[in-house]
Amino acid sequence: MTDLHRLSIRELSEGLAGSKFSSRELTEHYLKRIEKIDAQVQSYVTVTPEQALAQADAADALRKSGMANVLTGVPVAHKDIFCTQGIKTTAGSKILDNFISPYDATVVAKGKVAGLVTLGKVNMDEFAMGSTSESSYFGATKNPWALDHVPGGSSGGSAAAVAADLAPFATGTDTGGSIRQPASFCGLTGLKPTYGRVSRFGMIAYASSLDQGGPMARSAEDCAYLMNVMAGHDDRDSTSVKVDADDYVANLNGTSVKGLRIGIPKQYFNVAGLDADVKARVEESLKKLEEMGATLVEIDLNMTDAYVPTYYLIAPAEASSNLQRFDGVRYGYRCENPVDLTDLYKRSRSEGFGPEVQRRILIGTYALSAGYYDAYYVKAQKVRRLIQQDFLKAFESVDVIAAPSAPTTAYKIGASLDPVEMYLGDIYTIAVNLAGLPAINAPVGFDKDQLPIGLQLIGNYWSESQLLSVVHQYQQATDWHTKRAAIAEETV
């Protein structure tokens, strides 16, 4: 079958259950697509054909024995930030280019239990620091909709792989928008869960109080299937919360759009730099939701100006602490012929880390240094609480909050964005991580250059089912999520 990559997760599951095709046939189909197409997209860092086919054969045997799960035999791509036993795990960095993980991250382990077939590891901004996937040591990933544009970041490889139909769905991580923004740039659905909903064990840390894993796929329904695998408490993760996970697939129609109160923050639609096409498409999607029975309620979010400075103090501070372990001593890159321990540290880190990672380590170390800790880091944490309270006050009068996922569509690769401009591009996403809230991106149209645009819906704590349900119903009434880039239409 030449069109297996066009099937939804539900259709793949039903096809496998009905023996219309085997997991080996499905896996071989995706591996052939990767071999033919990915040289143009560069979404994968490591492809694992031997392991994938072995997992596919095991899945087929389970199907024959009647012991299969719903997703047994369905392929998946993992962001290269999740540790995978026996497979190189790089976090997009030279400093981990030779690191073979001795264990699986919980997300990967749960995928194996569910019977998922790992196609490989996909590219990302180095240590998840960036919004374009250009900071990867392995080179820039391309946006399938326009190969001279970025796919967004840091989960750009995940987004590009799904958008080019090189994987049916993929895992991502979101520290300040790294699932939602690339999903927006690549015309996908991407969910950032409530902090603590998905285990961080085995997920290489950037900023521990902000990082959260989540699914990326074409539709809310596809995301729900992967959320059923990823979500749940994990004793090995001290930040994992003991709140029962939902059956996200069963709950896809659990929230009616009729009567839903959608908060429209007036500050979000008056941000300098908000592209006119982005604003127009987002407003059209909100009008469609209103036609479906939702009520639009104008709200105030008064802490908007504090989002970027707060995030870019807290995140680099935590990165500075987390990345001190990469010292050239225990694992990872080590400089050649160090003269002493100090030289080993300095050269291993300066040669192993890229410019963006070094920049954030320096910012974070400065913010945590004696004399500045109280003035910067402690104050940022206090402002963080005010941002959280601002959202909670808004949720007293609305059910979800709407915003663009990004102020623009995808940038051109190599565009002269200075770091501050890139940081300002996170204005709509970073507050969600600071507050620990869930949020989802849904594709809602295109700009004049036919680049995708995304709507972001932000929910209250533990409302992933509600967000998936609202987007699922929107996607039953629209077809934006079914649109495919030309490269995805290529057959093998």
Image (spheres, grey):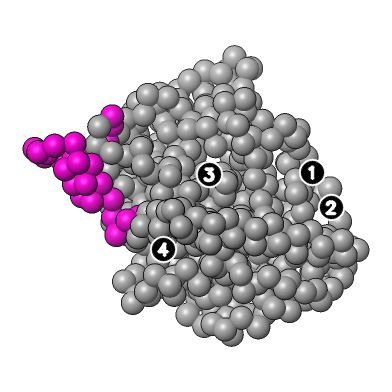
Query: In 3D space, how far apart are the residues under numbered discs 1 and 4 (Cα atoms)?
Result: 33 Å
Q: Amino acid at mark 2?
A: Thr
The spot of residue 251 in percent (x, y) is 79, 43
Mark 3 Cα shell of 10 Å, populated few (<14), some (14-19), many (≥20): some
Report if the CB atoms under discs 2 and 1 are less than 8 Å apart.
yes
Question: Would you identify the image quadrant in which residue 68 lies?
Answer: top right
The label on residue 132 is 4
Q: Amino acid at mark 1?
A: Asn
Q: Which residues are magenta?
A: 330-358
Instruction: Quickly name the residue at label 1.
Output: 251
Q: Is residue 138 left or right of residue 107?
A: left
Q: Earlier in the sequence, mark 1 or mark 4?
A: 4
Query: What amino acid type should be assigned to the residue bearing mark 3?
Result: Ser
Residue type, mark 4 in image: Thr
Q: Earlier in the sequence, mark 3 or mark 4?
A: 4
> Looking at the image, which is closer to me, 309 or 131?
309
* Real-space Cα separation, disc 2 to disc 1, in angstroms: 8 Å
The secondary structure type at the circle numbered 1 is: loop
| CA distance for labels 3 and 4 | 21 Å
Residue on which the image places disc 2: 255
> Marks 1 and 4: which is nearer the front?
4
**Crowdedness near tag 4: few (<14), some (14–19) or many (≥20) residues, C-alpha within 10 Å:** many
Regarding residue 314, the answer to whether it shows in the image is yes
Sequence-wise first label, 2 or 4: 4
The foreground one among 234 and 466 is: 234
